[in-house]
Image (spheres, rainbow, N blue to C red):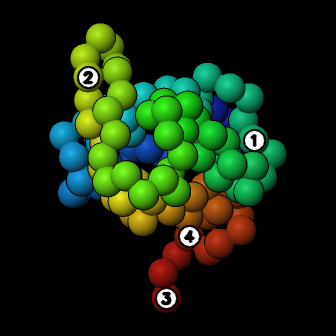
Amino acid sequence: MPDTSEIARLFDRRPRQWGAPGDPVAWDVLRDRICAVPVPETATEFAALLRHEFTHLVGIDIDDTAAEREFVAGGQSETVHLPTWRTILLPLLTTRARQLYGELPTERP
């Protein structure tokens, strides 16, 4: 099972493109929230925790049809682009976790 520093490293390689200005802020806040709880035992548990913490952060389920959602971080109101999180960012983190937990190979053919 990975440790907290390995989980934190899942967030080190940041995406090149974001959907909204608040997405990088949400990425950092989500990393901090994920690293503040016990490390999940499986990648499936990690994915569930990721969805739970994202929902708690923005106050709306990731599958909601809204395109954007505001949240507050560090006293500032930020906007995230939910379709980007739903189709790119959360799947990216989940794939990285599956590699970390040994469920997917880490090398590309």
Q: Which residue in the protein does label 3 denote?
A: 109
- Residue topped by disc 2: 77
Query: What residue type is disc 4 on?
Result: Thr
Relative to residue 109, is residue 22 drawn left or right? left
The kind of secondary structure element at disc 3 is loop
Q: Earlier in the sequence, mark 2 or mark 4?
A: 2
Residue 39: x and y in percent read 72, 35
Dot 3 amino acid type: Pro
The amino acid sitting under disc 1 is: Pro
Mark 1 burial class by Cα count in 10 Å: few <14, some 14-19, many 20+:
some
**In the displayed structure image, the side of residue 67 where residue 45 appears, left or right:** right
Q: Element under label 2?
A: strand
Q: Three-letter amino acid code at disc 2?
A: Ser
Q: Which element carries disc 1, helix, strand or loop? A: loop
Residue under pointer 4: 106
Across and down, in percent, residue 59 comes to 49, 33
Which residue is located at x 26 percent, y 36 percent?
79
